[in-house]
Amino acid sequence: MRKPGLSAARAVLAGSLVQNKARSTLSVLAIALGVALGYAVALITGAAVNELALGVQFLAGDADLQVRGPRSGFDEAVYPRLARLPEVAVASPVVEADAKLADRDDVLKIIGVDVFRAGAVQPGLIAQAGDRLDQLRPDMLFVSSAAASALGVVRGGELAFQVGLRTVTLRVAGVVPGGAQQRFAVMDIAGAQTNFDRPGRVSRVDLRLRPGIDIDAARERIQAQLPAGLAVQRPEAGVAAGEGLSRSYRVNLNVLALVALFTGGLLVFSTQALAVVRRRPQLALLRVLGMTRRQLASLLVLEGAIVGVVGSALGLAGGFVLARAAVRVIGADLGAGYFRGVAPTLALAPIPLVIFFCLGVTIAMLASLVPALEAARAAPAAALKAGDEERAFSRLRPSWPGLVIIGAGALAALAPPVAGLPLFGYLAIALFVIGTLMLMPRIAVMLLAALPLPRGGPPRLALLQLRGAPGQVAVSLAAIVAAVSLMVSMAIMVASFRVSLDAWLERILPADLYVRAGAAGDTAYLGADDQARLAALPGVRSAEFQREQQLLLDPSRPRVVLLARSIDAANLARQLQLVRGPVTLPPGAPPPVWVNEAMLDLYDFAPGKLIELPIAGKLASFTVAGVWRDYARPQGAIVIERERYIALTGDRSATSAALWLASGVNPDELSRAIAGDIPGGSRLEIAAPGEIREVSLKAFDRTFAVTYALELAAVVIGLFGLSSSFGALVLSRRREFGMLRHIGMTRRQIAAMLATEGLTISAIGLLVGFGLGWLISLVLIDVVNRQSFHWGMELNVPWSALASSAVVVLALSTLTAIASGRQAMSRRAVLVVKEDW
Amino acid sequence: MLVVHGLTKSYAGPRPRAVFADVDLSLSAGDYVAIMGESGAGKSTLLNLIAGLDSPDRGSISLDGTELTTLGDDALTALRRERFGFVFQAFHVLPYLTVAQNVALPLSLLGVVAPEKDARVKSVLAGVGLDGRGQSVPRELSGGELQRVAIARALVHAPRVVLADEPTGNLDADTASQVLRLLRDQIKSHGAAGILVTHSRAAAQTCDRIMQLTPTGLHALPPG
Amino acid sequence: MRRRRFLASPLLLLASGTLAADDYPRVLPGQTIGFPRDAGAHPAFRSEWWYITGWVREPDGNPFGVQVTFFRNRPRVAESNPSAFAPRQLLFAHAAIADARYGKLRHDQRAARAGFGLANAAEDTTAVSIDDWSLKLVDGAYIARIVARDFRFDLRFAPSQPVLLEGDGGFSRKGRSIENASYYYSQPQLAVSGNVAVDGRDANITGTAWLDHEWSSAALAPEASGWDWIGINLDDDGALMAFRMRDHAGAALWAGGTFRGRDGALRSFEPAEIRFAVERRWRSPRTGIEYPVAMRVSVGNDDYALEPLMDDQELDARASTGTVYWEGAVRALRGGREVGRGYLELTGYGKPLTL
């Protein structure tokens, strides 16, 4: 009995997949697209991060431990103390600078080493020189092969850098082989200190411990002896901290790609659910012939598995091609600026490959599971009877599970981040979507009941048909609801972000003209003389200067930014967009600092809290006097009064200036005056607030370009889903259309009926999708973004954009419905009234 | 009223097959004719040709003086809507409509509106013995009841011709004879002409005449 | 394997003639060598070394050679750089053990720029150090502490004789030009005592060693490709030093030597009085370089046959510096009878030192 049953099963299976070539293809493509996007995103970000990690590893060489501190470095006297520690075999001091190239808007990482020490710790950095003394000459550097090709320099060439407002020209003594794809240059540490204005300071000391020393125990002993603001860690910790900055962005991209895959799964679900309904009598026949429920369910899940396997295989190939193209066209950071200077080589990463293959197959199988179980559960006798199709959907109807799941989603949205990632936020979104989809039949019934019944003709018939089959409506809608809600939520989130960013930019740019020492890197600055000259320029009414520094507060996180600027306590709101505070300091309290929202989230620097900051190697006490909005520094930023900063550090240099002009002064003329009258002034980057705003918003749009692309993919899959399920529905109703044609309905009337159905279904989909999207956007704004990037923003709904996309989706889905019905109107289809199934 | 003359049909394709040739048939109002024939003789094809759902290779079909073979699809559809009624073997009662809505479909298509439509539906349902079942849904009905609904639908708009293709193929013998009797009575009482396609001698005998469809045309069979 | 160690070859630095000798103080005849000042470093000069070689043994063990060398170099590439890291003075050190049972040299090296108290060459007396390697003159005796990869020294070298000023009162010519010269003194017959640990085994040893302290700015003439040098402690408490500078053809370009008898009588030799004749060559299986490991050295009328403790005393520093030389313990024989022990140094046999 088993064997004939199974061979019949195989026939049914093969028949179904082959017969419905178009829909099977669509299902395969939907899974392929989801898998391709996921794999491509994983490949690209994985490669970039891997390259970054390789770079850190390469630069760290064989170091067991690294001592790091503020970005600008720390007192070199720490180095001999470390070198003399009994645990330490070799201590290799390093001066690092992201040196601004004089003739282009780019930076080159300068690594100043003591060859005699680095040779034992970072041998990869040491190049063979024609003249060995070139390794000691202060005006010579060795560039990595990646830097050599990127900058187009060869041995014997010259590279000019901007230091302060001066130009420093160094000669290229050779090329460092290896170094993966890292762009950097190595030179003598003394030359690096002198040329790049790091007198008496080192950026890092890499330690190799004596054999047999326990690294972690040594780390603790060494840490205890370090001055404030310095940390000793394993080199891997640097990788983690470096990754930390981009991690949220990468996770968000991956989640978006998974959403595309999820939508693809919904499409498979729709297709399978309807295919099962269409074949109900055939499947019932198999049961009558002796196939068990389990065998039948397995058979149908196997169909999903075939779709999954083919789709995933195609998707992996497509994903690799896509990733290659994306890296070539928009770069490894996908336009977000996180992996500047990294040119990774893509390899067929096996782990993501396996993961996404399994994911694709699993999702396709899960999507087939619900219809499969339903089909297996059906009583064969009843199912054999025509007109029983709608019964298949009655199981999807109870409403409490959906409500429970949505409730669980609401709870998940309240949960804190996990390891800095908004995992519960994502869970909340998933639960909202799943819960809503489960409630779809109920929602469809309610909405359809609310629609007035047209008096007559095809629209009346259409609405009656929809009312009679809310389960089918719900299944058709699953993919489109998911896609629309994603689109709407992303649109709301991006719009809210953009509007808030714009408002913030306006707030932080009150001056008439902004001057920056250098667009990039950390070698350009304005000296005290330069500042005096700027302030004294005719036409400048007043000038404010800002010094940007970076402090290491937590070795496991990226450094936080310290901004020293003049603060007018009486008029604070003009300078900082405070979202908490300002706090009035009690008498005798330590001096104030103001922190951005990231500091509040990451370090719990709440207003009124007493904190200590390692400035100039010493811990200084401060009071958090307020929290300000900041879209620029998700790693955290602290504003300190400039006078206090100078008192603590003696550092009078500045990295940027804000100029207020006397009335009647033309900013363009002043810009020319700055470039002309100040020595080195032509190196200054001068911008009006409008330009800065424009550039910032452009960067913002570029960052979200990939997001838009992923979102579009999800919507396309959603439309696929609608068209696929509509096609299946129409096919399942072809005898009905045949009868209607017999009794005198014209093609146009049938088309009108289908169009009405399509329009109604997509309107419901849009309505529910918009509602769900709005809910998801709240989670994105208040949970996902806040926890990922520590950005607060105000809700802003882009009505006109949403309305126009709604019209597009409505039009497309109506056309889809009509196109699906074309088949039903053919003469051949009219004759199927004879068919009994 | 319905005059079919010299109707010839063959199927094109890789192996062209002649179905029948030179079929002649003439029906007046109140005529009820059974067409028998072996499987594949083209019984259903003949019905489709008469209903304007398929076009013949040769021959003419005229209904009340209108030549069907020269009409376009829209005109044929309008003609069907107005003058034809259909009863199918598989009932084809729409599951998402009530019995009354199903029966009212042809009237809706003809633009007949409320009070008259409801009255005609009520009357025709009474005629087929489904008085008071108008608000039932098809799922609650037996096979015989579903075919009564179909008969009501075929007659509600007072068509000139009712075409029934194996209407009892899905029914048991008792129910079948009831339905056949009902169909005959309804066609007669509405003054329509009827064609019953069947392979059952018993069913055919409910008609006035019995014709045998052969490749060479329609031939009258002796009753009994 | 990847932990290559950078070590600029002192010999290479000595020879790298990118700067004219004029930039450094010149080595002039007629200067007085005075102590303790001249035992210290002379940072103005281009290069300088303190070179100790000796034969030692455990009380009842086989004799073996030890070598401790500190080099100082002034590269003159960053003298005006105010950075504390500026490489004004570079320090290097080699240490080696020549044990016939091991069959080749055990050796290790250190290199650093002077500064931060981590590497230093004092000017007031002999006190050179690189991290945990040091050579210091304490209470009249040299104390060497070396912690190498596979051995450790903790040795005391006590002078038993007065300082020996080489050449003309410490002015030692190295070539035909008067420019090519060094200040050079030796301490023969140093009494060695202390501890040597090899492979984790500590051994108290005694023996006899030789110290050279030499500083110069242009010792190697442009036409020279290397040199052969010996320093022998004679069994009768006498001391013999001889060297020859070779040209690119391998012929002697210049030679010099000093003999101090047991009575303390000093005799300096003219170039013509010194001859090095090759007795036997040995080819290194690693580098393929052939060294004249057994030589006959004629000094005046005296002939010494030099027999190496073992053939393979090659010091291979190619991985870091590209230079390979032979620095080995030798026995000195006259008429087949051993009359003293010391070291033979053979440089420039691979590539010319002038690279």
Image (tube, helix red, strand yellow):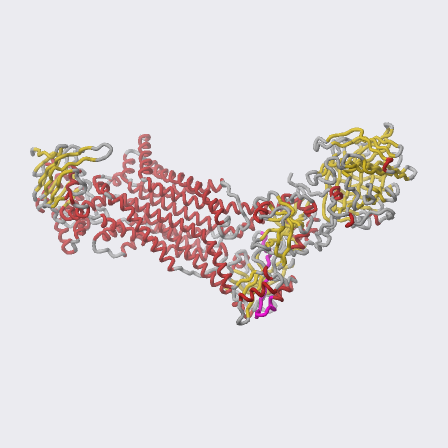
Give residue A151's position: percent from left, percent from top: 58, 49
Q: Is residue C64 above or below residue B151?
A: above
For residue C102, what is the image quadrant? top right
For residue C305, what is the image quadrant? top right
Residue closer to the observer: B222 or C280: C280
Question: Can residue A221 be seen at all in this image of the molecule?
Answer: no
Q: Is residue C268 above or below residue A329?
A: above
Give the residue drawn at x 37%, y 46%.
A266
Give residue A391's position: percent from left, percent from top: 27, 45
Q: On the picture, is A359 further left or further right than A676?
A: left
Total marks drawn? 0
Report if residue A535 lies within the magenta region.
Answer: yes
Work out which quarter of the rendered image holds the C terminus of chain C and state it: top right
Residue closer to the observer: C151 or A181: A181
Work out which quarter of the rendered image holds the N terminus of chain C and state it: top right
Q: On the picture, is C41 further left or further right than A618?
A: right
Give the residue drawn at x 85%, y 41%.
C187
Report if residue C298 lies within the magenta region.
Answer: no
Q: Which residues are magenta?
A: A534-555
Q: Is residue B169 above or below residue A95?
A: above
Question: Can residue B119 be seen at all in this image of the molecule?
Answer: yes
